[in-house]
Image (spheres, coloured by chain):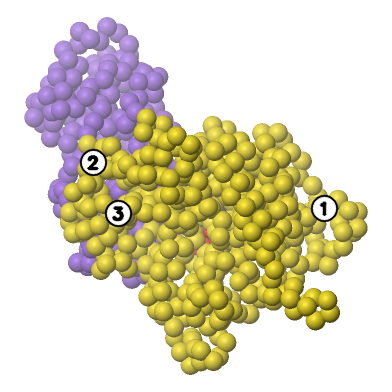
């Protein structure tokens, strides 16, 4: 038996684990789970667990719906907050009954894209800045109530928030997710937790864990945590800025002490790839109708496709790295939001960046000015284009993109487009309160 | 550790006839190790098993030419990128003086002719020292306790829930407390293979371990600037 299997079996026994959750992710980025008992663990490792995929978003196929979840023993962790710590979890890879990888499995898609980068000599490392809100409840029938809005929480607000913060950090760290907590001064209800960088596959797993932990711990305290990109008009939305770097044989491939901002040719070409393909990949990094309400001027979210060292309105930022820390050289891609499917988002990002490297794209010039007030004609003069302004526009761009089709594979590419087109159609047919307020009085 | 592969240095001449080498191979095999003959450093690189070398046994020979070659091999084996293979030197009583200024070229020596059980004991000690042997069932270091049999770890009697690789890394460091290991060595010995960005992986795992230890004990794993990591109870670096 493989030592990793043995390790999990022993841990389950020693720690008296009663339930093991096998996790995987659907195409839309929702976490799914199949629970098994310790007695079933052996056979789960050997043969996997069969289940009917037809109910899972993006898993159904015409003839076949049976798929197999194979747990990845290296991801075994206890869930310290659930059932007194007697539940463990593992991420799974999904395969077809004949043993081949299932093309609808986002984790498999990411692995394939990472392997391609590796064949070129690079491993992708990622550190996300996760933003989210705590609300009084998750009732969609009224405006989300902020924790600091006075009426509801009053005195207890800061206590609840700091207690939740402490507990969240300790649970995350117990699950191998080291974090840094930041405060949001402008909106105490909004929180930011930065996850320490690690390889992209592990990070995608960590984001899935993170979203679950934050939401469940909030529920424990009768609060509702939301990763919706723009829950409240007029208040900054929640982003998921991604710090990205490639490591090669000789360490951080983005680092070159001689180059401008310490960013190597490889780093520049990768960035050029992200910029050139930004419009095509945005439907994946920002997948909700609501995502595009965050990507507007005036709220520190990027609108224009540009890069700069220090510019909060740029799509890509090149953070200053300390001279004595070459391994921290990285770029920050600022459009993604925390509602995305991290496996698919990392897949299209690495594909776009690697394309820049393999084709030797030139990085356009840095744009230092504040782009918030940029008009279309000024943008035209500068030669900058804008990110898609709506999900519909993003889907049009995606549909034309060979790069995205290749990165996601036909199965997911087509399913995603179909699903999202129908989401857009629903939205388009909807009449919003804004429209009533604006038009009813005069028309 | 299931497979322990030993490189037995034979040198260039028709060495298979050399009874010492035959005896070394037999002794290793008897002890459950896998013995592979290597003629020179190229062989050592070319024949490297997937799991890496656990060690090398080097009979230094008697002729001038043979000893030069053998010591050259020991030296070069230290320079193979990212790996230090524990070296056990087999040496005749009249050559012992050669050991004196070559301390960094071998890890242990044994006099030729040797007794098989002595060689086995030295080999298992070498394996233990380089963190490869099953070693003791319980590894204890201050508040930290590792049970190698059940894979359990605890810190001040509080169970530490670790992933497999976190556990393996911690065990490796704990078996040789105070000893500094480079990221490359750790990657090589703990992960057992090399992949791109690999050395970063070590940092990432160290950070996770420290987070799981909690602030009070995070210092148990110390960073030795521009060298690597060690597990140590003392706070000083
Ligand atoms: N190579 C990298 N790739 C992606 N993100 C990185 C990389 N290196 C650092 N980061 C991220 O950038 C941020 C700053 O990290 P960095 O290590 O430079 O500074 P720091 O937080 O002061 O670290 P330390 O406490 O180790 O000094 C962190 O969020 C980290 O996760």
Q: Are marks 2 and 1 in contact (CB under 8 Å)?
A: no
- Chain identifier, yellow in the render: A
Label placed on residue A35 = 3
Chain B image colour: purple
Asked whether mark 2 and ligand 1 are closer than 8 Å, the reply comes as: no
Q: Give the alpha-carbon distance from disc 1 to disc 3, as whole Å.
A: 50 Å
Q: Where is residue A344 in the image (x, y as percent from the top left)?
A: 55, 47
Give A148 or B125, whichever is nearer the viewer. A148
Label placed on residue A83 = none
Q: Do the residues labelled 1 and 3 touch (CB within 8 Å)?
A: no
Q: Quadrant of ligand 1?
A: bottom right
Question: Residue at 62% of width from left, 38% of height from top?
Answer: A405
Question: Residue at 23% of width from left, 31% of height from top?
Answer: B4
Q: In which quarter of the image is the C terminus of chain A?
A: bottom right
Question: Residue at 33% of width from left, 71% of height from top?
Answer: B216
Does label 1 or label 3 sit earlier along the sequence? 3
User: Which residue is denoted by mark 2 in the rendering?
Assistant: A43
Q: Is residue B35 above or below residue B87?
A: above
The number of numbered discs placed on residues in the rendered structure image is 3
User: Which residue is denoted by mark 1 in the rendering?
Assistant: A384
**Occupied quadrant, residue B2:** top left
Give the number of the mark in front: 1 or 3: 3
Question: Residue at 69% of width from left, 71% of height from top?
Answer: A432
Q: Are marks 2 and 3 on the same chain?
A: yes
Residue B63 vs residue B76: left or right? left
């Amino acid at each position: 038996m493989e030592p990793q299997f043995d390790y999990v079996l022993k841990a389950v026994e020693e720690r008296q684990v009663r339930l093991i959750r096998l996790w995987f992710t659907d195409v839309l980025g929702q976490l799914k789970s199949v629970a098994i008992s310790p007695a079933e663990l052996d056979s789960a490792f050997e043969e996997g667990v069969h289940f009917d995929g037809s109910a899972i978003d993006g898993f159904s196929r015409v003839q076949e719906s049976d798929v197999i979840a194979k747990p990845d023993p290296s991801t075994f962790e206890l869930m310290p907050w659930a059932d007194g710590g007697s539940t463990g979890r593992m991420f799974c890879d999904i395969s077809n009954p004949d043993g081949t990888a299932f093309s609808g499995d986002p984790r498999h898609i990411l692995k394939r894209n990472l392997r391609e980068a590796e064949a070129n000599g690079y491993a992708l490392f990622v550190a996300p800045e996760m933003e989210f809100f705590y609300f009084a409840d998750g009732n969609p029938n009224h405006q989300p109530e902020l924790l600091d809005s006075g009426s509801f929480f009053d005195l207890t607000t800061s206590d609840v928030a700091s207690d939740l913060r402490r507990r969240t950090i300790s649970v995350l760290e117990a699950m191998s997710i080291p974090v840094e907590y930041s405060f949001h001064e402008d909106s105490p209800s909004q929180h930011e937790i930065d996850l320490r960088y690690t390889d992209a596959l592990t990070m995608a797993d960590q984001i899935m864990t993170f979203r679950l932990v934050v939401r469940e711990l909030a529920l424990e305290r009768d609060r509702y945590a939301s990763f919706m990109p723009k829950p409240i008009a007029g208040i900054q939305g929640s982003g998921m800025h991604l710090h990205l770097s490639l490591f090669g044989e000789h360490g951080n491939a983005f680092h070159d002490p001689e180059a401008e901002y310490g960013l190597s040719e490889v780093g520049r070409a990768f960035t050029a790839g992200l910029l050139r393909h930004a419009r095509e990949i945005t439907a994946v990094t920002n997948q909700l109708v609501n995502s595009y309400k965050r990507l507007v001027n005036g709220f520190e979210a990027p609108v224009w496709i540009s890069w700069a060292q220090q510019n909060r309105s740029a799509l890509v930022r090149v953070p200053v790295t300390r001279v004595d820390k070459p391994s921290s050289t990285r770029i920050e891609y600022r459009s993604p939001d925390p509602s995305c499917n991290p496996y698919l988002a990392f897949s299209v990002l690495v594909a776009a960046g690697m394309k820049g490297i393999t084709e030797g794209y030139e990085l356009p010039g840095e744009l230092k000015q504040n782009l918030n007030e940029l008009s279309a004609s000024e943008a035209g003069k500068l030669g900058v284009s804008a990110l898609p302004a709506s999900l519909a526009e993003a889907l049009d761009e995606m549909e034309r993109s060979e790069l995205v089709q290749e990165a996601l594979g036909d199965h997911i590419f087509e399913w995603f487009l179909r699903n999202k087109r129908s989401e857009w159609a629903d939205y388009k047919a909807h009449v919003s309160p804004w429209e009533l307020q604006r038009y009813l009085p005069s028309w | 550790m299931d497979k322990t592969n030993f490189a037995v240095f034979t040198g260039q001449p028709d060495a298979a006839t050399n009874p010492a080498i035959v005896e070394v191979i037999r002794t290793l095999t008897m002890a459950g190790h896998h013995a592979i003959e290597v003629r020179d450093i190229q062989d050592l690189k070319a024949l490297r098993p997937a799991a890496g070398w656990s060690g090398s046994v080097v009979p230094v020979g008697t002729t001038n030419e043979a000893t030069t070659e053998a010591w050259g091999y020991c030296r070069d084996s230290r320079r193979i990128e990212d790996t230090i293979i524990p070296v056990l030197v087999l040496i005749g009583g009249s050559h012992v003086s050669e050991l004196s200024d070559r301390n960094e070229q071998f890890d242990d020596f044994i006099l030729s002719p040797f007794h098989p059980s002595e060689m086995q004991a030295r080999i298992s000690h070498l394996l233990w020292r380089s963190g490869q042997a099953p070693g003791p069932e319980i590894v204890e270091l201050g508040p930290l306790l590792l049970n190698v049999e059940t894979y359990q770890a605890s810190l001040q009697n509080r169970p530490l829930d670790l992933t497999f690789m976190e556990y393996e890394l911690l065990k490796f460091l704990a078996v040789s407390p105070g000893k500094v290991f480079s990221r490359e060595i750790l990657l090589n010995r703990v992960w057992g293979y090399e992949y791109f960005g690999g050395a970063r992986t070590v940092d990432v795992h160290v950070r996770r371990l420290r987070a799981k230890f909690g602030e009070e004990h995070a210092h148990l794993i110390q960073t030795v600037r521009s060298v690597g990591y060690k597990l140590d109870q003392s706070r000083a670096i």
